[in-house]
Image: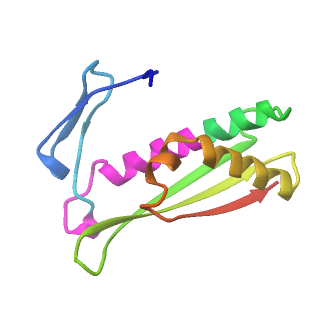
Amino acid sequence: MTILYATKVAATGGRKGRIRSADGILDLTLAIPKELGGMGGATNPEQLFAGGYAACFENALLRVARQSGHRFADGDVEVVAEIGLSRNEADAFVLHASLAITVAGVDQATAEALVQGADAICPYSNAIRGNVAVAKTVNVR
């Protein structure tokens, strides 16, 4: 398998530390959210995961749309990812995910077909499939 892109990000200090990419473009302070007993005031791994998943899924949807003859303008598609953290019966931490996808200019059936196609090729979806249930809502406008 040919790797198309790879990146490196180093973390120091865990959830209340810092992350920095090898190229220096990503350089962020992390904080434990107030909801988990921390100080808040900085990003956290769940926010980063949600942002990456939303952006990646939207790009996958745009690709599937182009391949099926649909062209969308900026703002015609929005993906909002929500990532939650809980504990399972074994007291281990587990993730929960949901995607709210809005597509303009197509009917509901077309939007749902595009979302299904995006889910099949999105690397985030493929990485968590079978481990994290992802609830999806599809809306058209």
- Judge from the rendering whether residue 12 lies leftward or rightward of residue 97; answer left or right: left
Horizontal and vertical percent position of residue 100: 62, 58
Q: Tell me, yes or no, whether the highlighted magenta stretch contains residue 36.
A: yes
Q: Is residue 58 above or below residue 46?
A: above
Question: Furthest residue to the bottom?
Answer: 89
Q: Is residue 18 above or below residue 101?
A: above
Q: What's the magenta region?
A: 34-57
Q: Which quarter of the figure has residue 91?
A: bottom left
- Judge from the rendering whether residue 117 lies leftward or rightward of residue 11; answer left or right: right
Magenta span main SS: helix
- For image coordinates 62% across by 46% down, the residue present is 120
- For image coordinates 57% across by 53% down, the residue present is 80
- For image coordinates 87% across by 45% down, the residue present is 105
Query: In the image shown, does 18 or 58 lie closer to the viewer?
Result: 58
Horizontal and vertical percent position of residue 11: 18, 38
Question: Furthest residue to the front?
Answer: 1
- Judge from the rendering whether residue 134 lies leftward or rightward of residue 31; answer left or right: right
Q: Is residue 1 above or below residue 101?
A: above
Horizontal and vertical percent position of residue 99: 58, 57
- For image coordinates 19% across by 51% down, the residue present is 15
